Amino acid sequence: MEETEKFMAIGYTTKKTRLLKLTVSRPQDVPAIREALLAEGIAEEIFEADILFKNRFLVDHDLHGMQWAEADVTKTTTSMVKVPAFEMKSIKPLDRKDNAQISILSFDIECVPSDSNRPLDSRRTCLRASSGWWTNTTPT
């Protein structure tokens, strides 16, 4: 368990919130631990329990969508997928505004949460749905 300051993953905030972060080695233990912390009064509220790995990874590394990042990787092999695989040693966000020299299709939906402490669901108001694409054939 560690004390940390993070932007909340759900809802919009302009400042970081002081939180306790508990990391477990067995994801299947999260529901029981979450319920025990609440039942014993150790925690008033639980945030991000059962959060998907991809979202947890982004929050932990201060990354977000449509952002440049730099990773220190080594090529590896795996029998799980038939594409090149890499083991990441570290990753950090980059402050770049230029476009990547690749073909991109992006789709985004912005919704209004009725309660900023809860995840979005299909009953929330959709503000905007957008898509964009471009092709840049200049080699990098």
Image (spheres, helix red, strand yellow):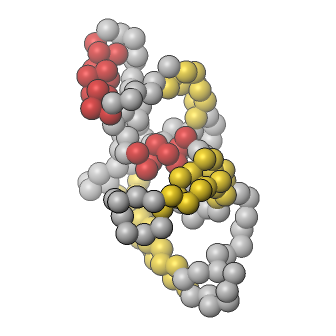
Q: Which residue extends farthest bottom?
A: 137
Which residue sits at x=39%, y=11%? 42
Q: Where residue 79 sits: x, y (%)? A: 35, 60
Which residue sits at x=57%, y=21%? 3
Q: Where residue 57 sits: x, y (%)? A: 49, 45
Q: Would residue 127 be visible to someone looking at this image?
A: no
Q: Where residue 9 sits: x, y (%)? A: 48, 42
Q: How many marks?
A: 0
Above or below, comparing residue 139 to residue 29 in the picture: below
Q: Is residue 125 left or right of residue 133?
A: left
Q: Nearer the viewer, residue 19 or 75?
A: 75
Q: Nearer the viewer, residue 52 or 38?
A: 52
Which residue sits at x=67%, y=58%? 70
Above or below, comparing residue 16 to residue 134 in the picture: above
Q: Where residue 5 sits: x, y (%)? A: 61, 30
Above or below, comparing residue 4 to residue 125 in the picture: above
Which residue sits at x=43%, y=50%? 54
Picture quarter with the C terminus: bottom right
Q: Would residue 112 be visible to someone looking at this image?
A: yes
Q: Which residue extends farthest top?
A: 40
